[in-house]
Image (cartoon, rainbow, N blue to C red):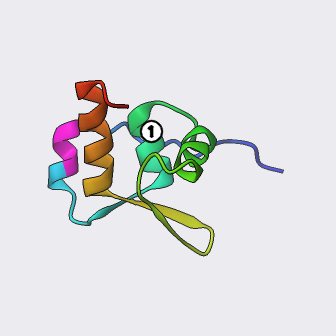
């Protein structure tokens, strides 16, 4: 069994605007927040940020992720 985790590079806020797609993978959002994807998954289940799942993949709309970050900067989160 291979237990080596796939490394996801950390993203900067400016890079959100430069993405050529409108969604983030769960692993990308977790890397940005510097948390484990399972921790973010638990937060998503609580309804903290909009997301959708197709099969086993969880996607977070960039706009919803940005709202989460802006709310945290305002002290809402």
Residue at 52%, 62% in the rendered image? 58
Q: Is residue 54 above or below residue 67?
A: below
Give above or below for 54 relative to 46: below
Residue 21 seen by the camera: yes
Give the x, y percent position of residue 15: 20, 45
Residue 51, image x, y percentages: 44, 61
Q: In the rendered image, which residue does mark 1 sit on?
A: 31
Residue located at (63% from left, 68% from top): 56
Callout 1 environment at 10 Å: few (<14), some (14 to 19), or many (20+)?
Answer: some
Magenta: main secondary structure: helix
**Is 26 left or right of 69, judged from the image as shown?**
right
Describe the element under mark 1 as helix, strand or loop: helix
**In front here: 13 or 44?**
44
Q: Which residues are magenta?
A: 12-16
Residue 12 seen by the camera: no
Taking the spot 21% from the left edge, 64% from the top edge, the residue there is: 20
Above or below — where is 22 with respect to 24? below
Q: On the picture, is 65 further left or further right than 6? A: left
Is 34 in front, or is 64?
A: 64
> Seen from this angle, which residue lies furthest right?
1
Name the residue: 42% across, 50% down.
49
To which quarter of the image does residue 62 belong? bottom left
- Tell me where residue 45 appears, x and y as whole percent: 59, 52
Q: Farthest residue in the front direction?
A: 76
């Amino acid at each position: 069994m291979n237990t080596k985790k796939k490394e996801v590079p950390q993203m900067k806020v400016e890079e959100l605007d430069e993405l050529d797609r409108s969604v983030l993978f769960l692993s990308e959002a977790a890397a940005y927040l510097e948390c484990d994807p399972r921790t973010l998954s638990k937060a998503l289940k609580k309804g903290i940020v909009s997301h959708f799942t197709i099969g086993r993949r969880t996607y977070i709309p960039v706009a919803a992720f940005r709202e989460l970050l802006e709310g945290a900067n305002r002290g809402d989160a």
